[in-house]
Amino acid sequence: MSSNQLRTFISYSRENQQFALKLACELKAANFAVWMDQYDIPTGARWDDEIEKALRECEIFMFIMTPASVASENAKDEVGYAIDHGKHILPVLLEECEIPLRLSRLQYVDFTQKSFSEGIKSAKELLSTMVNEAESTVQENTSSPVSNQKEIHRAVEEPITVPSKKGARSYLSQIDSADIAGTEDRNKRSLKWVLAGIFGIISVLIGSTLLFPKFIPSPLPTQTATLRPTQTTMPTLSPVPTIAATPTTVVLRSFTEEFDEESIWKKNWTLIFRNGDPNKRMNFRSAIADGSIVFNLNRKFIWAYFIYNPAVIYSNVEIEVVVEDLQHIETFALVCQYTDKGWYEFDINGGGEYYLRYVDNMDSDVDTEGNIIKQGFIPSINYSPRDEPRENQIRVNCNGNNLSLSVNDTTILNKYPSEQFVLEQGQIGIAARSDENYPVRFVLKSITVREP
C-alpha cells in the first residue's frame, strides 16, 4: 500500500471550518490523502453515512483542538472511535484549551505558538512520519494470518459499524467479548480432537510392536552428505524512476464564474452564515439557473457568505460582478482579504448607499459603527423597479489595505487606504444580506476575478 492510499480523517468544530479548509487544502496540495466532509461528501449523499464510512476506512485521525471541538459530543464520539480502533492520532492545537486526557500524551502540532506557514510545515512533517508508521502497521497486519482470521470472523459473523451518538468503547467491548468467548470455545474443541488423535496414534504403535516385533526394521546407517556451496550471480537491477507527484486539484486564481453546474459552484465556494443562528440556514436559498445564481432570503438578519477556495490567497486582486434586480433596500457585498482575523467588506444596496467595513469575525451579530472605514452614496446605481429588473456592474480592487470601488464604470473610491484596520492579504468572497427587510431576492449573473 502506498502512502497516498493511507487516508487521514480531519475532525473539527464548525466554528473552525475556515481553518480546517485551509489545512486540508494545504495537505492535499502536498499530495497527502486527506478526507474532510466539506470536500469529500458528494452532493446528495447521506452526511452521517459518509462520515461513518470515512472513519472506518481512515488510518490516521487528525483532530483540530479548540474549546468548541473538545466540548462537542460528536467530536468526542469520533475521537473515542479512533482511539478504540487503533487509529494513528494526530492532534492539532489551534486554540488554547484543556486537552482531553486520552490525547494529552500524544505529540501534537501547536498552531498557538507558530504562524500558519510554520504550523503547516510541522503538520506535514509529523503527518509524513505518521503515514510511514501507519503503512508499516498495515503491512504487518496483512502478513499476519491470525489477524486476517480475526478480521474475516468479524466481517462474516458480526460486521462493525461506527456508532453515531453513543460511546464507541462500550459498543466495541460487546463485540470483543463475543470474539473472546467464541475463540475459547473453538480452542477447547480443537484441543479435545488433538488429544484424541494423539492417543489413537500411540495405541496403534504399541499394538504393532507387541503383535509383529520381527517386522520392525532396524535403523538405517547414518550418511553424511557434503554440500558444496553454489555461486549465484545476482542480476543488476535498474534504478526505479522517480515519478513526480501531481497536484490533486487545479486551482484558478484569475477566472470568470459561469455558473454552469451547481456541484462545481459548491466545490469552489464555501457557504458560511454570520450572525450565529443555524436555523437561519433554512430561510436562505440559492440556486443556479440559466447561467446565473438566484438568492432568496426569507427572514430578517440573514447574512450568508460564499468564500472562494481557501487555497487561494490574494494580496492584490480585482473582483467584478454583475448583479440584477437589486431592490431599494436589498444588500449585496463583496469581500476581500478574508482571514480568521477579519476582512474588508463592500456593502452595496439597491437604493445607492455603500459601506466599506472592517468585520472582525463570523460570530459578530451587529455591524459596529466604529468599524466603518468609509460610507457614501452611489450616483450611478441602477435602481430596479419590481416590474423592470436592471443590472449593476460592481468592481472592487484590494491591494493590501488600498481599497477601490466603482459602480457601472463610475469611480466611487480610488485607492482609499485603511489606516486603522490593516489587512495585507486573504481570500475573496461575496455575501447576500437581509436586515429588517425581507424577503430579499436578486440575481448574480457573473463573477470575474483578476490579479492586476
Image: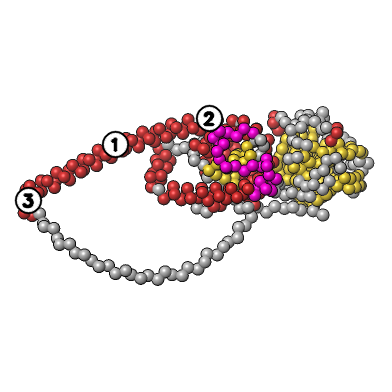
Q: Secondary structure at mark 1?
A: helix
Report the residue at 52% width, 30% height from top: 167
Quadrant assignment, res 391: top right
Q: Is residue 382 magenta-colored? A: no
Q: Residues within 10 Å of mark 3 (few under 14, many from 20)?
A: few
Residue highlighted by disc 3: 212
**Kind of residue sitting beneath label 1:** Lys
Q: Earlier in the sequence, mark 3 or mark 2?
A: 2
Tell me where residue 204 appears, x and y as whole percent: 14, 46
- Residue type (three-letter) at the residue carrying disc 3: Phe
Q: Examine the image and state in which quarter residue 271 appears.
A: top right
Q: Does the image show residue 310?
A: yes
Residue 445 in view (yes/no): no
**Residue contact at pointers 3 and 2, CB within 8 angstroms:** no
Report the residue marked by disc 1: 188
Q: Which residues are magenta?
A: 97-121
Q: Considering only vertical position in the picture, is 236 above or below 137?
A: below
